[in-house]
Each structure stands twice: as structure tokens, then as C-alpha cells.
Image: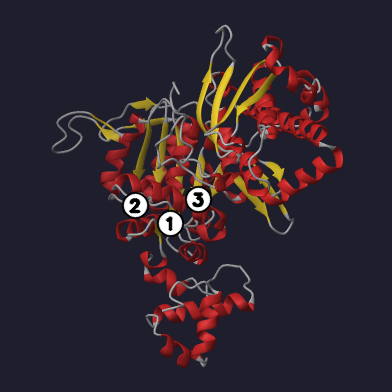
Amino acid sequence: MNGELMMQTSNLDLRELLSFKPQGGSMSFLEQRIYFEDLYSQGIKRMDLCQSLGPDITKSIVIKAGFTKGWLVAERIRRSMPELWDEAKMGKLGPLLSSMYGFGEMLYNQRQDGIINKPLVDSYFVGLFEAEQQLELIGQSDEAVCWEGIGFASGYVSNVEQRTVYFMEGECQACGDKYCHLWGNYVEEWGDEITPLLPFYNNISNESVASQLSDVLEKEYQLPPIIQTKIKDTLWNSKDDDSYPVSASYAMNRLLDIAANVAKAPTSVLVTGESGVGKEKLVRFIHDNSQRKDKPLVAINCGALAETLLENELFGHSKGAFTGADGNKTGLIESANGGTLFLDEVGELSPAMQVKLLRVLQEREIIKVGDNSAIKVDLRIISATNKSLEKAVEAGEFRQDLYYRLKVIELVIPPLRERREDILPLCRQFLNRFNDVLGKSFTGFNHRAADLLLNYDWPGNVRELINVIERAAVLGINAQIQPEDLPDELHTLATPTSTHDTILSLHEVERCHIISTMKKLRNNKSLVAKKLGLSQATLYRKLKSYDYEDAEG
């Protein structure tokens, strides 16, 4: 095959695009309600439909359902991310979406506009689910079986082109071929080879689906910003593992939506949260999504410098202001002119510095140390603290007027223990980073290691998580991160004594306690059984039911 291999989708973890509402029994993928159906039950249903309705009617139903699904996926992308539409027209987005929806891996995709006697789109796949389904349940087929696949491709490309496109399958792995070869063209530009398939499409078209779904499309039909970002980063092969934030939780997604709206205005923002939650990352997110993104973002830690040094750093000085001031110095506030000034640990400002900062906020001007003339500045101030400024105001440690000036809008980042859906996505992000840095190739986390990560309370929040993942990446020797690669505190504290609000079943309480005891006593089963008041046979049985890897030892 000629042409370039398609992009890899490994830097988009599909689990991060899934959202679950266990209490409501619902799941969403790309913010669309979905439900799981396994390969076998779906295949049996298709076989039953073929027996009841006949293979031709079933084939038509499946193709048309696939067409509608593909068309709707394209519509969501078109409405949410119009800046990607050129990428879609060039055929760069389809392979990603095909993988995301589980059809199979696209090895090759080529668009061939204007080439006489050539299809508009020419694609090769391996592992298309319908071909695998056929081989698993029935055996080798005499004809191509990827009906939903050609329907999905037809609907998607029809929406992209705003002209009806039909796909057909020439080679199919279900028939013993090496690949599933799909190609598509505008209906009116197909030759006689499409004629046998036309009855199965039954005149479905770009226009007919748009008309049929008109009521649905009148509603807001867009992907949320965080999902848009994930797709863009994957499509454009983003390598910025420091990008913030990775989130699968409602709390953080809601916070990001608010932050994205706040970014559009020059309003002062106060970012609060425990140490290590990622306040500086959120500040960067706000700046990068603002109209000031092409101007500097200047950060200073207010608690890291003595008062005299801080004043000099913030405001600068004029020549001769003090001994050693041989020239004028531009302060950080003036350096941030036109952009954003980030004051980290703003709660550490002295009373005198609070007065000076209040003047900057009120007058939008500064006076350098040793100078009398004011310099006008245009900047946005974002501050952050892990202290309660409200309590500091009550205690007389922080000026109330400055507090309200800084806190026009307050964004509170919840601690990691309150957004546990974010833990594994963050772990995977940082594992990918350390794979690159350390030259490792970890594929993920053993399920027992994932349990430990999920059940730990993370008092140091994301900063602590980064250190844990780096340690695991350095020590790990298997394809996946194992429980023994994680520090002892995760084994001893990931138990029912955690302070989070999760209510565990008695079975889970017992499991956590037994495994914790095994770790503490270095897997000495006879000693563990004695300490727990169990027979060794009972302990062995319980460990085996927990899938504890040393259960047979």
C-alpha cells in the first residue's frame, strides 16, 4: 500500500472520554448516552434478525443505522469544533473517530479528490468488529460482512462533504482476506459496481438524515470544551504532557467550563485549594484561553521573598534608589503589562505590600522604588493561595478591601480525594511523561495497583501523585505498574480508615484489611492467619478470591 500510515491514537485514553453515573445506571461517550453490548450478544441478535427478517432486510437496517450514527458523530464535531473541519475534509479525523468508536484499527486512509476512476476515499482496516464477530460465531464468510462499518463511514463522510457518499467493502477479513478494504464515493460518481448495494442503502442520504433528525438538531448539540480539547490534542499529536488539566470528573469539568468563561473577561480571579492541587496550572489555563494569551504571564511567589526584595521585584527601581542601584530596573508588574500577573501564595503578603498592591488594582499604575512618577499598566491579576483569606481578614491579617478586589471571582479547585474519577487519567498522563523521560514503555497499571491508587487519600494531591508515578516508573520492571512499585503509604493507608466519604461494603472492608495485613507482614501467610484468627485454608481461599497475586505462594 502507498501513502502514509495513519496517526496513532494511543495518546488519547478512551476511558477519559467515558463518563459514568452509577446511581442512575447511565454512561456517556463524547457526552452521548451509550450502553455496552458485547461482541457475542450483538452477533447473536444479528443472526436472529437474519433468520426472522432475512439477511437482506437485516443488512439494510444495519447499514442505515450505521449511516445515522456516523452522520451524527460528524455533526457533533462540525458544531463543536469548526476549526477542525478542514482536517476532517482531508481525511485526518475519520481514523481517530473509527478507533474511538471501536470499529477497528485503520492502517491506511487516502483521499483522492478529482482522480478519474478512483474512489473519493480509500481505506484499509484490521480487526473490524463485524469481521471478528463473523469468524467467532459462524466462521468464514463468502461475502463481506462489515455492514455497520460501511454505513458509519458513509454517514460520516456524507456529513463532512454535505453530499451523499456510499461506501462498499471489497476485501474482508471475514472472507479470509488480510484486510478489510473499504472505499467510498459520491453516489452519482459511482459506476456499476455500487449497483448491488443500492437497495440496502434504500435511498438514505445526507439530506434525509438531516431532515429526520431536525428536531434533535434544534437542541444544543455540541461537545463540551474538555472533550474538544482531548480530541484536538490527539489529532494534532500534542506532546505537552504538562497540559492542564486532565479530568474525567464532573467537579473539574464544571470548574473548567467556568474558568473558560472567566478567561474571556479581564476580571481579577482568586484561585484557592489545598497545596498541590494544581493552582498554577489552572492559572495557565485561564491565561491561555484569554485574549491576553499572546502577552506574558508573569508569576511570583509572594511567600518566597522578604518584603523589601518583593517590593523591588514587583515594582522595580530607578537608578540611584539605593546603594548598588546602578540603573533602572523593570519590575514584574511592568513586565506583565498587557498580559497576566500571577501572585502565588498571596496570603503571605505583608500589610505594607497589601496597601501597595491595592493601589495597583485601583489606579492601574505603579511607582518604582526611588521614583515619584507613576507608570500606567494594563494587566490582569490572578492570585492563588492555600490559606483561607476570609479567616485572615477576620483575624486582621489581610485587608478586606484588597480581598474583595482580588476575589471578584473565586475558583476553588477540589482536592484529589473529592474527585477520584480524575486519579487514573492523571496517573496515565504522568506515566506517559515518565515513559518518555526515562525511556520506558509501561502500558498502564495492574488492576490491583489501580485499586491502591484510587483508594489512597492523596494528602499532597496532584504533586504527590506525580512523585508516586515517577517512583513507580523508575522501579517498575514489568509491562504494567505493579502494587509493589508503589510506596508503602499507599498499601497501609488505602484502607477503610481513609477519611473520604466512600462507604465500603463489609466484604470490601475485610478484603482491604486482609491485604493490608499481608503487606505489613511481608506475605507471611501463617503469621497473617494467626494474627487475623483465621485458618490458613480460609486465608488461602480468601486471597484467591481477591485475585491476590501471591495467593498461591
Cα gap from disc 1 to disc 3, whole angstroms: 20 Å
The quadrant where residue 228 appears = top right
From the top left corner, tell me how far across and down residue 440 is, in percent: 32, 50
Can residue 290 be seen at all in this image of the molecule? Answer: no
First-in-chain label (1 vs 3)? 1
From the top left corner, tell me how far across and down residue 149 is, in percent: 65, 33
Cα gap from disc 2 to disc 1, whole angstroms: 14 Å
Q: What's the amino acid at mark 3?
A: Pro
User: Pointer 2: what residue?
Assistant: 303
Q: What's the amino acid at mark 1?
A: Ser
Depth order, front residue of 244/435: 435
User: Pointer 1: what residue?
Assistant: 275
User: Pointer 3: what residue?
Assistant: 425
First-in-chain label (2 vs 1)? 1
* Relative to 433, 117 lies left or right: right
Q: What's the amino acid at mark 2?
A: Gly
Depth order, front residue of 361/520: 520
Depth order, front residue of 64/126: 126
Under circle 3, the secondary element is: helix
Compared to residue 510, the image places residue 421 above or below, namely above
